[in-house]
Amino acid sequence: MKDIYDGRAEWSKLFEEVNFFTRYKHFISLTCAARSEEDHLIFCGFVESKIRHLIGALERNQGISLAHINPRQYKPLPTAVPSFGPGYDNPVCTLWFIGLEFDRAMAKAFDLTVEISQFHHIIVTTGIKMKNYNDGMKVVTEFITYSKLCMRSFNHDLQ
């Protein structure tokens, strides 16, 4: 923006797409899985509607200066589907990624356990009340760095 204001860049630069994965060094991957396509459609939409709660909780953590959801959904390749335990031989999965920027002063000592636990609690309790949840549905959150993300197998645009 400063380059545009100073006349060193054209206004069109403001509208260039920024690659989400090169913008951040740290991520939370959020995997939504269900045993059937029908359950997945319902559950995935429900989980997506609750992601804003997780973003809000992460941004209230003193160690995080920014939590940014990539609104694009990804499908893990069959070889990279996480193990969800017995009964999940071929789950239907969707991935989201949340880019994180840390407060440099707090970056060494941060813990996201509370925020992640609260998000899982919201998913289960609200899902049960709204009848959008059953035992065949799972949400898995994982902290991951850019270097590990590059090794992951999912349909992506990391360039």
Image: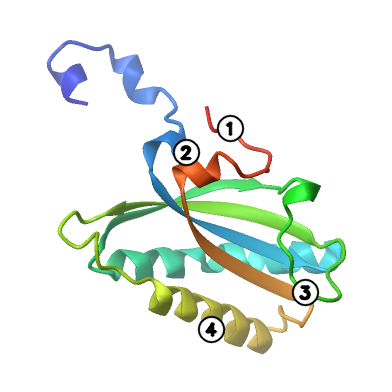
Query: Going from the N terminus, do you reach mark 3 or mark 2 first?
Result: 2
- Label 4 packing within 10 angstroms: few (<14), some (14-19), many (20+): few
Q: How is the image coloured?
A: rainbow
**In this view, the mark in front (2 or 4):** 2
Q: Residue furthest left?
A: 6
- Please provide percent x and percent y for residue 15: 38, 24
- Please provide percent x and percent y for residue 73: 63, 48
Q: Amino acid at mark 3?
A: Gly
- Label 1 packing within 10 angstroms: few (<14), some (14-19), many (20+): few
Disc 1/disc 2 C-alpha distance (Å): 8 Å
Disc 2/disc 4 C-alpha distance (Å): 28 Å
**Dot 4 lies on which element?**
helix
Q: Amino acid at mark 1?
A: Asp
- Please provide percent x and percent y for residue 127: 65, 81
Disc 3/disc 4 C-alpha distance (Å): 20 Å
The quarter of the image holding the N terminus is top left
**In this view, the mark in front (3 or 1):** 3
- Front position in the image: 1 or 30: 30
Q: Which residue is mark 3?
A: 85
The label on residue 121 is 4
**Dot 3 lies on which element?**
loop
Disc 4/disc 1 C-alpha distance (Å): 31 Å
Query: Going from the N terminus, do you reach mark 3 or mark 4 first?
Result: 3
Q: Are marks 1 and 2 in contact (CB under 8 Å)?
A: yes
Q: Which residue is mark 2?
A: 21
**Dot 1 lies on which element?**
loop
Q: Which residue is mark 1?
A: 157
Name the residue located 61 percent from the left edge and 68 percent from the top edge: 140
